[in-house]
Amino acid sequence: MINETAIVIAVHDDAWEVERNLPKYLEQVCNAKFKVIVVDDNSTDDTSDILKRMQLDYPNLYTTFLPASSHRKRRRLALTLGAKAADCDWVALADIDYAPENEEWLSRLLQVAEENEGVKLVVGTCKRRKASLWKRYRKWCKTIKLKRKVKSREKFKLPINNALVSKDLIVRKGELYASCEYSVWANDARLLK
């Protein structure tokens, strides 16, 4: 049974998306205790002010800041920093540009992890609401490629959104990388753009 988890989100100049989508992550209905860790990558807009204001309303919201550096993979660095800050065994990675399809998104990811004994990675799907046919086709191709890698147990870089990961898989050579034998796909745990 998974008793505690954290949702890690990296943001950079995403004030509008934070105000629109973050409450949907914070208001998840879940049996497990959870917190949302937002890593701010030196935003220059009102993102940090919005996060401070939201912390007053949501006690399960924690924020941290990425130090200034010339690191190229800043989004992955931010997610890794957020995952290290989590003091629980399971971490859900999310993208602020996407909102959970419903309020049971997190509980569905956790349920799939609990149903499959020995699983270390649960990958969900992301959908665009009003995308062109070409964009939807490209997203579908990427999704099929990732599904094949998950099913064949190949090594692959972790998706940076909609994945529930056992924390012991997250940090490997400073990158988010999965090389686990037991991973599973959750088709009905969706994020919507």
Image (tube, rainbow, N blue to C red):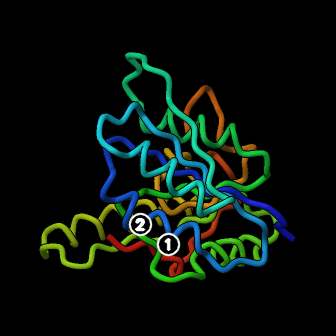
Q: Return the x and y of residue 41 as percentages of the image width and height.
A: 42, 34
> What x and y, as percent, mark residue 50?
43, 51
- Number of marks present in the image shown: 2
Residue 142 higher or lower than 173, as above or below? below
Circle 1 residues within 10 Å: few <14, some 14–19, many ≥20? some
Q: Which residue is mark 2?
A: 21
| Mark 1, secondary structure of its residue | helix
Looking at the image, residue 83 sits to the left or right of residue 161; the answer is right
Q: Position of residue 90 (x, y in %)?
A: 73, 56
Please tell me which residue is depicted at 78% across the width and 78% down the height of the picture: 31
Foreground: 10 or 191?
10
Determine whether, in the image, residue 43 is placed left or right of residue 107: left
In the rendered image, which quarter contains the C terminus? bottom left
Snapshot quadrant of residue 43:
top left
Between 30 and 111, the residue placed more toward the observer is 30
Which quadrant of the figure contains the N terminus? bottom right
At label 2, counting other C-alpha atoms closer than 10 Å, the crowd grade (few under 14, some 14-19, many 20 or more) is: some
| Rendering coords of residue 156 (x, y %) | 51, 47
Give, as a three-letter code, the residue at label 2.
Asn
Q: Is residue 124 left or right of residue 83?
A: left
Kindly give the residue lying farthest to the top in the view shown. Answer: 70
Residue visible at 22% across and 64% down in the picture = 138
> Height in image: 186 above or below 8?
below
Tag 1 residue: 24
Horizontal side of 119 relative to 144 (left or right) equals: right
Whether residues under marks 2 and 1 lie with C-beta atoms below 8 angstroms apart, the answer is yes
Q: Is residue 102 above or below residue 143?
A: below
How much space separates mark 2 and mark 1, taking CA atoms?
5 Å
Task: Please give the name of the residue rendered at 63% of the width and 45% of the height, measured from the top-left corner.
Answer: 179
Amino acid type assigned to the residue bearing label 1 in the image: Lys
**Does dot 2 land on a helix, a strand or a loop?**
helix
